[in-house]
Image (cartoon, grey):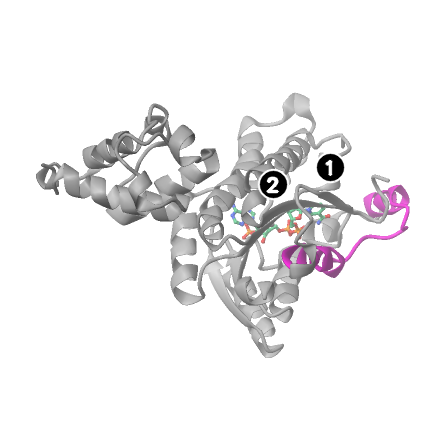
Amino acid sequence: MEITEIQERVSKILAENLSVPEEKVTPEARFQEDLDADSLDLVEAVLALEEEFGVSIPEEEMEGVRTVGQAAQLVASKLEPSTQA
Amino acid sequence: MSDRRASVALVTGASRAIGRATALALARSGLAVAVGYRSDPEGAEEVAAKASADGGRALPISIDVTEEKSIEGAFTRIESELGTVRVLVNNAGLSKDGLAVRYPTEAWDATVNTNLRGAFLCSRRALRGMLKARWGRIVNIASAAALRGNSGQSAYSASKAGLVGMTRSMAREVAIRGITVNAVCPGFVESKITAVAGDELRQRYIEMTPAGRFGTPEEIAGVIAFLAGPEASYVTGAILSVDGGLTA
Ligand SMILES: NC(=O)c1ccc[n+]([C@@H]2O[C@H](COP(=O)([O-])OP(=O)(O)OC[C@H]3O[C@@H](n4cnc5c(N)ncnc54)[C@H](OP(=O)(O)O)[C@@H]3O)[C@@H](O)[C@H]2O)c1
Protein backbone atom coordinates (compact mmCIF):
# COMPACT_ATOMS: atom_id res chain seq x y z
CA MET A 1 0.00 0.00 0.00
CA GLU A 2 1.32 3.45 -0.93
CA ILE A 3 1.77 5.95 1.87
CA THR A 4 -0.58 8.33 0.06
CA GLU A 5 -3.30 5.70 0.04
CA ILE A 6 -2.71 4.98 3.70
CA GLN A 7 -2.84 8.71 4.41
CA GLU A 8 -6.16 9.00 2.58
CA ARG A 9 -7.75 6.11 4.43
CA VAL A 10 -6.41 7.38 7.76
CA SER A 11 -7.84 10.85 7.09
CA LYS A 12 -11.22 9.43 6.15
CA ILE A 13 -11.46 7.35 9.34
CA LEU A 14 -10.26 10.21 11.52
CA ALA A 15 -12.79 12.57 9.96
CA GLU A 16 -15.57 10.09 10.70
CA ASN A 17 -14.39 9.43 14.23
CA LEU A 18 -13.68 12.99 15.24
CA SER A 19 -16.77 14.30 13.44
CA VAL A 20 -14.84 16.90 11.46
CA PRO A 21 -15.05 17.59 7.71
CA GLU A 22 -12.56 15.52 5.74
CA GLU A 23 -10.88 18.56 4.19
CA LYS A 24 -9.77 19.66 7.66
CA VAL A 25 -7.96 16.37 8.23
CA THR A 26 -4.77 17.20 6.37
CA PRO A 27 -1.42 15.53 7.17
CA GLU A 28 -0.34 18.71 8.96
CA ALA A 29 -3.50 18.95 11.08
CA ARG A 30 -2.77 18.70 14.79
CA PHE A 31 -5.21 16.60 16.77
CA GLN A 32 -5.59 18.85 19.76
CA GLU A 33 -5.22 22.33 18.31
CA ASP A 34 -6.71 21.92 14.83
CA LEU A 35 -9.17 19.06 15.22
CA ASP A 36 -10.28 19.73 18.77
CA ALA A 37 -9.71 16.12 19.79
CA ASP A 38 -9.34 15.24 23.45
CA SER A 39 -7.61 12.13 24.79
CA LEU A 40 -10.77 10.02 24.66
CA ASP A 41 -11.42 11.06 21.04
CA LEU A 42 -7.87 10.08 20.20
CA VAL A 43 -8.11 6.69 21.86
CA GLU A 44 -11.30 5.96 19.94
CA ALA A 45 -9.67 7.06 16.71
CA VAL A 46 -6.75 4.70 17.32
CA LEU A 47 -9.17 1.84 18.00
CA ALA A 48 -10.85 2.59 14.67
CA LEU A 49 -7.51 2.71 12.85
CA GLU A 50 -6.45 -0.61 14.38
CA GLU A 51 -9.69 -2.15 13.21
CA GLU A 52 -9.53 -0.68 9.70
CA PHE A 53 -5.92 -1.69 9.04
CA GLY A 54 -5.81 -4.85 11.15
CA VAL A 55 -2.78 -3.59 13.03
CA SER A 56 -1.93 -3.15 16.68
CA ILE A 57 -0.66 0.22 17.86
CA PRO A 58 0.84 0.16 21.37
CA GLU A 59 -0.22 3.05 23.58
CA GLU A 60 3.44 4.10 24.14
CA GLU A 61 3.93 4.65 20.43
CA MET A 62 1.00 7.05 20.30
CA GLU A 63 2.68 9.34 22.81
CA GLY A 64 4.69 11.38 20.33
CA VAL A 65 1.91 11.52 17.75
CA ARG A 66 0.56 15.04 17.38
CA THR A 67 -0.54 15.24 13.76
CA VAL A 68 -2.58 13.27 11.27
CA GLY A 69 0.53 12.70 9.14
CA GLN A 70 2.39 11.20 12.10
CA ALA A 71 -0.55 8.87 12.75
CA ALA A 72 -0.51 7.75 9.11
CA GLN A 73 3.24 7.10 9.32
CA LEU A 74 2.71 5.02 12.43
CA VAL A 75 0.00 2.96 10.75
CA ALA A 76 2.25 2.49 7.70
CA SER A 77 5.09 1.24 9.90
CA LYS A 78 2.77 -1.41 11.33
CA LEU A 79 1.64 -2.81 8.00
CA GLU A 80 3.40 -5.80 6.45
CA PRO A 81 6.72 -4.64 4.95
CA SER A 82 5.62 -6.06 1.56
CA THR A 83 2.56 -3.82 1.43
CA GLN A 84 4.52 -0.66 2.17
CA ALA A 85 5.55 1.82 -0.48
CA MET B 1 -35.13 3.23 23.66
CA SER B 2 -32.14 2.53 25.83
CA ASP B 3 -33.47 -0.92 26.72
CA ARG B 4 -33.35 -1.99 23.12
CA ARG B 5 -29.79 -0.81 22.72
CA ALA B 6 -28.74 -2.42 25.98
CA SER B 7 -29.58 -5.79 24.61
CA VAL B 8 -26.62 -7.96 25.62
CA ALA B 9 -25.18 -8.47 29.09
CA LEU B 10 -22.22 -10.46 30.36
CA VAL B 11 -22.09 -11.58 33.98
CA THR B 12 -18.81 -13.19 35.06
CA GLY B 13 -18.85 -15.97 37.66
CA ALA B 14 -22.56 -16.46 37.07
CA SER B 15 -22.95 -20.19 37.71
CA ARG B 16 -24.03 -19.63 41.31
CA ALA B 17 -25.02 -17.22 44.08
CA ILE B 18 -24.99 -13.47 43.31
CA GLY B 19 -23.84 -13.94 39.70
CA ARG B 20 -26.59 -16.47 39.07
CA ALA B 21 -29.30 -14.27 40.56
CA THR B 22 -27.97 -11.33 38.54
CA ALA B 23 -28.00 -13.25 35.25
CA LEU B 24 -31.60 -14.28 35.93
CA ALA B 25 -32.66 -10.75 36.88
CA LEU B 26 -31.07 -9.26 33.76
CA ALA B 27 -32.66 -11.92 31.55
CA ARG B 28 -36.05 -11.12 33.11
CA SER B 29 -35.52 -7.45 32.28
CA GLY B 30 -35.22 -8.38 28.62
CA LEU B 31 -31.49 -8.62 28.03
CA ALA B 32 -29.77 -11.49 26.26
CA VAL B 33 -27.38 -12.72 28.92
CA ALA B 34 -24.00 -14.39 28.60
CA VAL B 35 -23.68 -16.55 31.72
CA GLY B 36 -19.96 -16.63 32.49
CA TYR B 37 -18.49 -19.65 34.25
CA ARG B 38 -15.01 -20.87 34.99
CA SER B 39 -15.17 -24.37 36.48
CA ASP B 40 -18.86 -25.20 36.46
CA PRO B 41 -20.42 -25.49 33.00
CA GLU B 42 -23.39 -27.47 34.39
CA GLY B 43 -24.20 -24.66 36.80
CA ALA B 44 -24.11 -22.14 33.96
CA GLU B 45 -26.26 -24.43 31.78
CA GLU B 46 -28.81 -24.61 34.56
CA VAL B 47 -28.87 -20.80 34.88
CA ALA B 48 -29.25 -20.40 31.11
CA ALA B 49 -32.03 -23.00 31.02
CA LYS B 50 -33.86 -21.26 33.84
CA ALA B 51 -33.50 -17.88 32.12
CA SER B 52 -34.90 -19.38 28.92
CA ALA B 53 -37.76 -21.06 30.77
CA ASP B 54 -38.66 -17.61 32.12
CA GLY B 55 -38.86 -16.38 28.54
CA GLY B 56 -35.39 -14.84 28.36
CA ARG B 57 -32.34 -15.52 26.25
CA ALA B 58 -29.10 -16.79 27.77
CA LEU B 59 -25.87 -18.42 26.69
CA PRO B 60 -23.40 -20.18 29.00
CA ILE B 61 -19.93 -18.92 28.25
CA SER B 62 -16.54 -20.06 29.52
CA ILE B 63 -14.52 -17.14 30.83
CA ASP B 64 -11.60 -17.09 33.22
CA VAL B 65 -11.02 -13.44 34.09
CA THR B 66 -7.38 -14.04 34.97
CA GLU B 67 -6.61 -15.09 31.37
CA GLU B 68 -6.60 -12.45 28.64
CA LYS B 69 -7.00 -15.13 25.97
CA SER B 70 -10.04 -16.53 27.66
CA ILE B 71 -11.59 -13.05 27.93
CA GLU B 72 -10.93 -12.31 24.28
CA GLY B 73 -12.36 -15.68 23.26
CA ALA B 74 -15.49 -15.16 25.33
CA PHE B 75 -16.14 -11.66 23.98
CA THR B 76 -15.61 -12.79 20.39
CA ARG B 77 -18.07 -15.62 20.87
CA ILE B 78 -20.66 -13.42 22.57
CA GLU B 79 -20.33 -10.85 19.79
CA SER B 80 -20.97 -13.44 17.12
CA GLU B 81 -23.79 -15.27 18.92
CA LEU B 82 -25.60 -12.53 20.83
CA GLY B 83 -24.15 -9.16 19.85
CA THR B 84 -21.98 -6.45 21.39
CA VAL B 85 -21.82 -6.50 25.18
CA ARG B 86 -23.54 -3.36 26.46
CA VAL B 87 -23.85 -4.40 30.08
CA LEU B 88 -20.91 -5.92 31.95
CA VAL B 89 -21.21 -7.20 35.50
CA ASN B 90 -17.80 -7.92 37.00
CA ASN B 91 -18.92 -10.45 39.56
CA ALA B 92 -16.21 -13.13 39.43
CA GLY B 93 -14.45 -13.05 42.74
CA LEU B 94 -12.23 -14.96 45.05
CA SER B 95 -11.75 -14.68 48.78
CA LYS B 96 -9.04 -16.48 50.66
CA ASP B 97 -8.89 -15.44 54.27
CA GLY B 98 -5.76 -15.50 56.38
CA LEU B 99 -3.83 -13.28 58.74
CA ALA B 100 -1.35 -11.05 56.93
CA VAL B 101 1.68 -12.24 58.84
CA ARG B 102 1.50 -15.72 57.30
CA TYR B 103 -0.54 -14.96 54.18
CA PRO B 104 0.90 -16.74 51.11
CA THR B 105 2.09 -14.53 48.25
CA GLU B 106 0.28 -16.85 45.82
CA ALA B 107 -3.02 -16.21 47.59
CA TRP B 108 -2.44 -12.46 47.43
CA ASP B 109 -1.71 -12.67 43.71
CA ALA B 110 -4.71 -14.89 42.98
CA THR B 111 -7.04 -12.58 44.91
CA VAL B 112 -5.86 -9.37 43.30
CA ASN B 113 -5.64 -10.99 39.85
CA THR B 114 -9.20 -12.21 39.98
CA ASN B 115 -11.02 -9.44 41.82
CA LEU B 116 -9.20 -6.38 40.52
CA ARG B 117 -7.13 -7.19 37.45
CA GLY B 118 -9.86 -9.45 36.10
CA ALA B 119 -12.47 -6.72 36.38
CA PHE B 120 -10.11 -4.28 34.68
CA LEU B 121 -9.36 -6.63 31.78
CA CYS B 122 -13.04 -7.39 31.17
CA SER B 123 -13.96 -3.70 31.39
CA ARG B 124 -11.19 -2.69 29.02
CA ARG B 125 -12.43 -5.18 26.46
CA ALA B 126 -16.09 -4.27 26.92
CA LEU B 127 -15.42 -0.54 26.62
CA ARG B 128 -14.49 -0.95 22.94
CA GLY B 129 -18.02 -1.86 21.97
CA MET B 130 -19.62 0.48 24.50
CA LEU B 131 -17.66 3.49 23.24
CA LYS B 132 -18.75 2.73 19.69
CA ALA B 133 -22.33 2.32 20.81
CA ARG B 134 -22.16 5.47 22.91
CA TRP B 135 -23.98 3.48 25.57
CA GLY B 136 -22.86 1.06 28.23
CA ARG B 137 -23.17 -0.11 31.80
CA ILE B 138 -20.41 -1.56 33.93
CA VAL B 139 -21.29 -2.81 37.39
CA ASN B 140 -18.44 -3.94 39.61
CA ILE B 141 -19.22 -6.21 42.53
CA ALA B 142 -17.00 -4.96 45.32
CA SER B 143 -17.75 -5.66 48.98
CA ALA B 144 -18.39 -4.09 52.36
CA ALA B 145 -14.79 -5.17 52.96
CA ALA B 146 -13.73 -2.41 50.55
CA LEU B 147 -15.12 0.18 52.95
CA ARG B 148 -14.34 -1.26 56.34
CA GLY B 149 -11.44 -3.44 57.44
CA ASN B 150 -11.76 -7.08 58.31
CA SER B 151 -9.16 -9.05 60.16
CA GLY B 152 -7.93 -11.84 57.89
CA GLN B 153 -8.95 -10.02 54.72
CA SER B 154 -6.01 -7.79 53.83
CA ALA B 155 -5.82 -9.16 50.30
CA TYR B 156 -9.56 -9.31 49.72
CA SER B 157 -10.17 -5.80 51.14
CA ALA B 158 -7.31 -4.39 49.10
CA SER B 159 -8.64 -5.94 45.91
CA LYS B 160 -12.17 -4.69 46.52
CA ALA B 161 -11.03 -1.21 47.61
CA GLY B 162 -8.97 -1.16 44.42
CA LEU B 163 -12.09 -2.00 42.48
CA VAL B 164 -13.85 0.95 44.10
CA GLY B 165 -11.04 3.29 43.05
CA MET B 166 -11.08 1.90 39.54
CA THR B 167 -14.84 2.38 39.37
CA ARG B 168 -14.55 6.07 40.18
CA SER B 169 -11.76 6.82 37.71
CA MET B 170 -13.28 4.82 34.88
CA ALA B 171 -16.65 6.45 35.47
CA ARG B 172 -15.07 9.85 34.89
CA GLU B 173 -13.32 8.69 31.72
CA VAL B 174 -16.38 7.49 29.88
CA ALA B 175 -19.34 9.39 31.34
CA ILE B 176 -19.30 11.73 28.34
CA ARG B 177 -20.04 8.75 26.09
CA GLY B 178 -23.17 7.63 27.91
CA ILE B 179 -21.40 4.83 29.75
CA THR B 180 -21.88 4.43 33.47
CA VAL B 181 -19.53 2.61 35.83
CA ASN B 182 -20.71 1.81 39.32
CA ALA B 183 -19.85 -0.49 42.19
CA VAL B 184 -22.07 -2.46 44.50
CA CYS B 185 -20.77 -3.37 47.95
CA PRO B 186 -22.64 -6.34 49.36
CA GLY B 187 -22.52 -7.21 53.04
CA PHE B 188 -22.95 -10.80 54.19
CA VAL B 189 -24.85 -12.70 51.55
CA GLU B 190 -26.04 -16.30 51.60
CA SER B 191 -23.56 -18.32 49.55
CA LYS B 192 -21.56 -21.51 49.56
CA ILE B 193 -18.94 -19.85 51.73
CA THR B 194 -21.33 -18.42 54.28
CA ALA B 195 -23.25 -21.73 54.33
CA VAL B 196 -20.19 -23.69 55.39
CA ALA B 197 -19.14 -21.10 57.97
CA GLY B 198 -19.82 -22.45 61.46
CA ASP B 199 -22.98 -21.48 63.36
CA GLU B 200 -20.97 -19.34 65.74
CA LEU B 201 -19.42 -17.34 62.91
CA ARG B 202 -22.79 -17.00 61.17
CA GLN B 203 -24.27 -15.70 64.42
CA ARG B 204 -21.45 -13.17 64.73
CA TYR B 205 -22.03 -11.91 61.20
CA ILE B 206 -25.73 -11.57 61.90
CA GLU B 207 -25.04 -9.62 65.08
CA MET B 208 -22.76 -7.25 63.13
CA THR B 209 -25.54 -6.54 60.65
CA PRO B 210 -28.24 -4.08 61.77
CA ALA B 211 -30.82 -5.83 59.58
CA GLY B 212 -30.23 -8.91 61.74
CA ARG B 213 -29.87 -11.37 58.88
CA PHE B 214 -27.86 -12.28 55.80
CA GLY B 215 -28.83 -10.78 52.47
CA THR B 216 -30.05 -12.96 49.64
CA PRO B 217 -28.40 -13.07 46.22
CA GLU B 218 -31.66 -11.72 44.81
CA GLU B 219 -31.42 -8.62 47.00
CA ILE B 220 -28.02 -7.86 45.51
CA ALA B 221 -29.13 -8.74 41.98
CA GLY B 222 -32.05 -6.31 42.17
CA VAL B 223 -29.69 -3.39 42.77
CA ILE B 224 -27.32 -4.57 40.01
CA ALA B 225 -30.25 -4.83 37.58
CA PHE B 226 -31.31 -1.30 38.50
CA LEU B 227 -27.80 0.05 37.79
CA ALA B 228 -27.75 -1.87 34.50
CA GLY B 229 -31.09 -0.50 33.44
CA PRO B 230 -32.32 2.65 31.71
CA GLU B 231 -33.52 4.29 34.92
CA ALA B 232 -29.99 4.56 36.30
CA SER B 233 -28.66 6.60 33.37
CA TYR B 234 -27.47 9.46 35.62
CA VAL B 235 -25.87 7.23 38.25
CA THR B 236 -22.16 6.87 37.66
CA GLY B 237 -19.10 6.49 39.85
CA ALA B 238 -21.45 5.54 42.67
CA ILE B 239 -20.41 3.09 45.34
CA LEU B 240 -23.61 1.55 46.56
CA SER B 241 -23.74 -0.43 49.81
CA VAL B 242 -26.25 -3.26 49.88
CA ASP B 243 -25.45 -4.65 53.28
CA GLY B 244 -28.36 -4.48 55.70
CA GLY B 245 -26.70 -1.51 57.39
CA LEU B 246 -23.35 -3.20 58.04
CA THR B 247 -21.34 -0.13 57.04
CA ALA B 248 -23.94 2.47 57.99
N1 LIG C 1 -21.27 -13.73 49.38
C1 LIG C 1 -20.93 -12.66 50.05
O1 LIG C 1 -21.19 -12.55 51.25
C2 LIG C 1 -20.26 -11.53 49.35
C3 LIG C 1 -20.07 -10.33 50.04
C4 LIG C 1 -19.47 -9.26 49.42
C5 LIG C 1 -19.03 -9.38 48.12
N2 LIG C 1 -19.20 -10.54 47.45
C6 LIG C 1 -18.70 -10.60 46.08
O2 LIG C 1 -19.73 -10.98 45.21
C7 LIG C 1 -19.20 -11.68 44.11
C8 LIG C 1 -19.92 -13.00 43.96
O3 LIG C 1 -19.74 -13.74 45.15
P1 LIG C 1 -20.71 -14.91 45.60
O4 LIG C 1 -20.56 -15.07 47.05
O5 LIG C 1 -22.03 -14.73 45.00
O6 LIG C 1 -20.13 -16.12 44.78
P2 LIG C 1 -19.04 -17.21 45.08
O7 LIG C 1 -19.75 -18.41 45.55
O8 LIG C 1 -17.92 -16.68 45.87
O9 LIG C 1 -18.60 -17.42 43.57
C9 LIG C 1 -17.75 -16.57 42.89
C10 LIG C 1 -17.88 -16.84 41.43
O10 LIG C 1 -16.76 -16.29 40.76
C11 LIG C 1 -16.21 -17.26 39.91
N3 LIG C 1 -14.78 -17.07 39.70
C12 LIG C 1 -13.76 -17.16 40.59
N4 LIG C 1 -12.58 -16.96 39.99
C13 LIG C 1 -12.85 -16.74 38.68
C14 LIG C 1 -12.06 -16.45 37.54
N5 LIG C 1 -10.71 -16.38 37.61
N6 LIG C 1 -12.67 -16.28 36.36
C15 LIG C 1 -14.01 -16.35 36.27
N7 LIG C 1 -14.82 -16.62 37.30
C16 LIG C 1 -14.23 -16.81 38.50
C17 LIG C 1 -16.52 -18.57 40.56
O11 LIG C 1 -16.46 -19.61 39.63
P3 LIG C 1 -15.50 -20.89 39.88
O12 LIG C 1 -15.86 -21.43 41.21
O13 LIG C 1 -15.82 -21.78 38.76
O14 LIG C 1 -14.11 -20.36 39.85
C18 LIG C 1 -17.91 -18.32 41.09
O15 LIG C 1 -18.88 -18.56 40.10
C19 LIG C 1 -17.72 -11.84 44.37
O16 LIG C 1 -17.00 -10.85 43.68
C20 LIG C 1 -17.62 -11.63 45.86
O17 LIG C 1 -16.34 -11.15 46.25
C21 LIG C 1 -19.80 -11.62 48.04
Asked whether B239 falls inside the magenta stretch, the response is no
Asked whether B208 falls inside the magenta stretch, the response is yes
Which range of residues does the magenta coloring cover? Answer: B201-229
* Residue found at x 28% / y 42%: A11
Could you tell me residue B57's position as x and y percent?
53, 72
Give left or right: position of A36 versus B141: left
In the image, residue B18 above or below residue A21: below
SS state under label 2: helix
Q: Residue B196 carries which label?
A: none
Residue B207 or residue B248, whichever sits in front: B248
Q: Which amino acid does label 1 sit on?
A: Ala
- Chain of the residue on which disc 2 is drawn: B
Query: According to the image, label 1 marks what residue?
Result: B145
- Chain of the residue on which disc 1 is drawn: B
Residue B232 or residue A19, whichever sits in front: A19
Magenta stretch prevailing secondary structure: helix
* Residue found at x 31% / y 48%: A51
Give left or right: position of B164 versus B36: right
Could you tell me residue B37's position as x and y percent?
52, 56
Residue B156, quarter of picture: top right
Q: Is mark 1 within 8 Å of ligand 1?
A: yes
Query: According to the image, label 2 marks what residue?
Result: B171
Mark 2, Cα crowd under 10 Å, few <14 / some 14-19 / many 20+, is many
